[in-house]
């Protein structure tokens, strides 16, 4: 069996999609605006359903900051996400 591996570097992560499972609204935006994908309280911007709970720091803000720090270190560090798919046998 052959594996197909797709590698995505953090510098290639440009668009974020956040979907509310209650109303189905999908918000898609530039990764730099990720914190606008949900309200500051963690509620859906459309139906006000609490879609993410956090006590202090919005995890989307943490993700944004982490990606910025990783990308600022691109001369000394490479981080990639690997998507591995099994290809069907022929």
Image: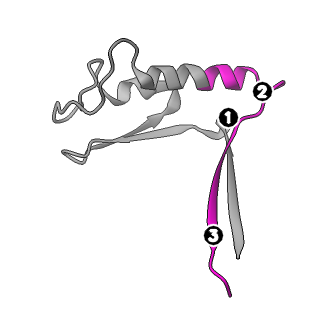
Is the N terminus in the top left, top right, bottom left or bottom right quadrant?
bottom right
Q: At numbered mark 1, what does the secondary structure look like: helix, strand or loop?
A: helix
> Would residue 10 appear left or right of 16 to someone viewing this image?
right
Q: Position of residue 33 (x, y in %)?
A: 45, 26
The residue beneath circle 3 is 86
Q: Position of residue 63 (x, y in %)?
A: 52, 26
Towards the viewer: 88 or 68: 88
Quarter of the figure with residue 18? top left
Q: Please, which residue is most extreme toward the right here?
A: 76
- Whichever of labels 3 and 2 marks the residue nearer the N terminus, that label is 2
Name the front one of labels 3 and 2. Answer: 3
Towards the viewer: 27 or 54: 54
Estimate the spatial distance between the alpha carbons at disc 1 and disc 3, rounded to whole Å: 26 Å
The answer to whether mark 2 and mark 1 are in CB contact below 8 A is yes
Estimate the spatial distance between the alpha carbons at disc 2 and disc 1, rounded to whole Å: 8 Å
Query: Which range of residues does the magenta coloring cover?
Result: 67-90
The residue beneath circle 1 is 11
Q: Residues within 10 Å of mark 2 (few under 14, many from 20)?
A: few
Identified at 83% across, 24% down, the residue is: 76
Towards the viewer: 15 or 20: 20
The residue beneath circle 2 is 74
């Amino acid at each position: 069996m052959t594996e197909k591996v797709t590698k995505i570097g953090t510098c290639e992560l440009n668009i974020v999609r956040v979907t509310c499972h209650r109303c189905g609204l999908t918000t898609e935006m530039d990764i730099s605006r990720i914190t606008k994908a949900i309200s500051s309280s963690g509620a859906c911007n459309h139906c006000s359903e609490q879609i993410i709970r956090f006590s202090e720091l919005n995890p989307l803000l943490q993700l944004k900051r982490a990606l910025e720090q990783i990308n600022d270190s691109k001369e000394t560090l490479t981080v990639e996400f690997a998507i591995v798919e099994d290809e069907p046998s022929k």
